[in-house]
Amino acid sequence: MLFRLDWIRERARPQDTVVFYFSGHGMEMGKQVFLLTKESDPRSLVTLKASACTGNSITEVLDEVKANRVLVVYDACRSNPKADKAGGDNRMGDASRDLVVAAAPNEQQRAAQEDKVLATLFACSPGQRSYEWNEKQHGYFTWYLIEGLKGAAAQDGKVTLQSLVGFLRKSVKQAADEAGHEQMPWQQISGTSPDAFILSQGRVTVADVPPAKPEPAKPPGPAKPEPQKPPRPEPAKPPRPTRPEPIAVVPQGSRSASLLGR
């Protein structure tokens, strides 16, 4: 994952938009936050440091991306599972702030002048956890994130960062409340106004697509006569050899006749 992020860092230009989304397991241990990829070993802090991605390693790469629009989204808000073996809620702690991508204090003014927006969205606030929505086969946050980008969060036909954040906070909280959970998405935004960060252009449905105009029927053209094939000449048969007629030979002085033929 860090290799891919570094690949983006080397190639992104100021006019580009970079979106990094991670949904999976996360851990907080030793006052550090870790994102658990497939090869992560969570048995101890030592194995985590050697195998998982730390929040600092991710933000260090993303902070150097030259794109003027950077959006980082995490649906992986968990704490140290060893401290929560009783089956209670596994809540996000303050260490998740290590995952925030933001301009440094001395870069805030320049970021605003360059029309740069750096935003980090979390599925829940510190002290809460991100819940799964079994009926939708997604978490509450990811489900409404997808719906919002598809157009449910659009205002005046555009989904901006600001309209998406407002939609997520309202929709996720309402769905979690109805299920008896406490979950409110949390965001950190720096740079110019989030309204300047356009993520998509409204919702496109089948009704929005104009029907295809039928092409005018072309008049049938004159039928082309099929070319006549010349008759195929039959090969000449060789003449059949004639059968020689038998010759009657009558020797002198004899009355008997012998037939000499073939």
Image (cartoon, helix red, strand yellow):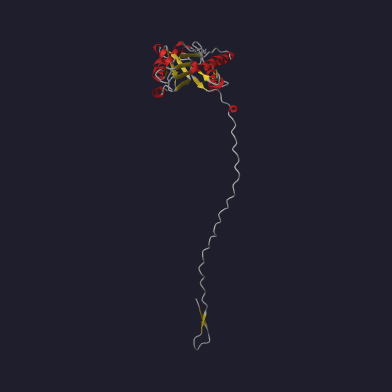
Pinpoint residue 202: horizontal percent, then vertical percent.
Answer: 55, 22
Pinpoint residue 245: horizontal percent, then vertical percent.
Answer: 52, 78
How many numbered marks appear? 0
User: Which residue reaches farthest bottom?
Assistant: 253
Q: Is residue 135 above or below residue 226?
A: above
Does any portion of residue 75 appear in the rendered image?
no
Does any portion of residue 160 appear in the rendered image?
yes
Residue 234 relative to residue 45: left or right? right
In which image quadrant can residue 12 be found?
top left
Pinpoint residue 209: horizontal percent, then vertical percent.
Answer: 58, 29
Q: Is residue 205 above or below residue 220?
A: above
49 or 57: nearer the viewer: 57
Residue 56 relative to residue 153: left or right? left
In which image quadrant can residue 64 be found?
top left
104 or 248: nearer the viewer: 104
4 or 165: nearer the viewer: 165
Which residue is drawn at the image coordinates 60% and 27% (left, top)? 207
Q: Quadrant of the N terminus?
A: top left
Pinpoint residue 169: horizontal percent, then vertical percent.
Answer: 54, 14
